[in-house]
Image (cartoon, helix red, strand yellow):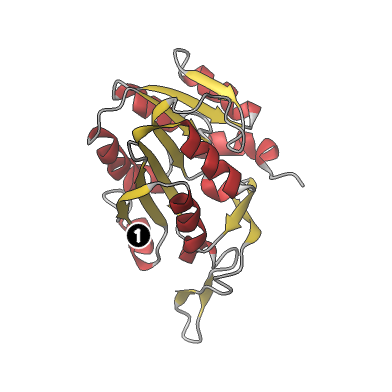
């Protein structure tokens, strides 16, 4: 089954532009960069880098990032926007790097796209150096448990967000602005157990709030949990 990314790449590039969407710009970017700036990082890998936006941000922080993505059109766009960058076709489930290659491993809204999450998290942990950080931004499991028909009107016409079958892992199709891609719903415990099983230690956990931007969009993000952000450390033996 196609995951939709090849067919949706052009619409994704148009939707995100060079600056990013509301959730990235006004919710996730600043807390993600704050965690990066809190540590001494030399090199990083962004797993599921898409068109390379977060890699460019890491490069602006003086970090050497490598961007990995399985969609050729997105890698081509990343290279066009950042000719000095290092962008490669590749899958999270099989990272073509030696053990302990990076100070920082990033997954910026990519875990929901990955089918074999067990193998992908094991690979992310494998290429992380002892003492390094695995930095994750993801849609919350409360949010994905409501997709694709989460917002509905109640009897008084008020918009309500509903979730169901929270503990059942499943695949859904996310559709907006010409984009149609596979997203995975998994309970939060699935991610937490896999990360703990890799021997990683939770350093930071947040559900960031919007800052700036369209007030109406911000109000909607405050009504419903959208994003979770985690930093996991790899202990030094």
Q: Quadrant of residue 90?
A: top right
Q: Say which of 65 and 28 sits in front.
A: 65
- What residue sits 52% from the left and 44% below the top? 121
Across and down, in percent, residue 145 comes to: 54, 66
Farthest left residue? 38
188 horizontally vs 217: left or right: right
User: 45 above or below 191?
Assistant: above
Camera sees residue 143: yes
User: 149 above or below 178?
Assistant: below
- What residue sits 31% from the left and 48% below the top? 213
Q: Say which of 213 and 41 sits in front.
A: 41
Q: Quadrant of residue 208?
A: bottom left
20 horizontally vs 219: left or right: right
Camera sees residue 177: no
Farthest top residue? 84
Q: Say which of 67 and 214 sits in front.
A: 67
- What residue sits 46% from the left and 75% below the top? 160
130 horizontally vs 12: left or right: left
Across and down, in percent, residue 205 comes to: 32, 54
Query: Secondary structure under badge 1?
Result: helix
Farthest front residue? 237
Instruction: Please give the residue where the numbered disc 1 appears in the rendered image.
Output: 216
Across and down, in percent, residue 231 comes to: 34, 46
Locate the C terminus and report the quarter of the image it occupies.
top left
User: 168 above or below 132?
Assistant: below
- What residue sits 33% from the left and 46% below the top? 26
How many numbered marks appear? 1
Q: Say which of 133 and 131 sits in front.
A: 131
């Amino acid at each position: 089954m196609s995951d939709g990314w090849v067919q949706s790449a052009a619409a994704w590039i148009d939707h995100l532009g060079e600056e990013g969407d509301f959730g990235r710009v006004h919710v996730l970017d600043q807390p993600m960069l704050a965690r990066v700036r809190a540590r001494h990082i030399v090199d990083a890998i962004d797993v599921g880098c898409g068109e390379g936006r977060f890699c460019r941000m890491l490069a602006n922080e003086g970090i050497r990032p490598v961007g990995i993505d399985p969609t050729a059109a997105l890698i081509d766009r990343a290279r066009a926007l950042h000719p000095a960058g290092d962008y490669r076709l590749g899958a999270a489930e099989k990272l073509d790097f030696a053990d302990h290659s990076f100070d920082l491993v990033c997954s910026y809204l990519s875990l929901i796209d990955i089918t074999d999450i067990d193998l992908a998290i094991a690979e992310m942990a494998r290429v992380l150096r002892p003492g390094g950080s695995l930095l994750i931004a993801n849609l919350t499991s409360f949010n994905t448990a409501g997709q694709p028909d989460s917002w509905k009107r109640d009897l008084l016409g008020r918009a309500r967000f509903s979730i169901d079958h929270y503990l059942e892992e499943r695949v859904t199709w996310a559709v907006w602005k010409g984009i149609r891609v596979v997203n995975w719903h998994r309970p939060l415990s699935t991610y937490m157990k896999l990360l703990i099983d890799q021997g990683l230690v939770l350093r930071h956990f947040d559900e960031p709030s919007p800052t700036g931007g369209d007030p109406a969009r911000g109000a909607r993000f405050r009504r419903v949990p959208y994003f979770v952000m985690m930093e996991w450390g790899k202990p030094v033996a």
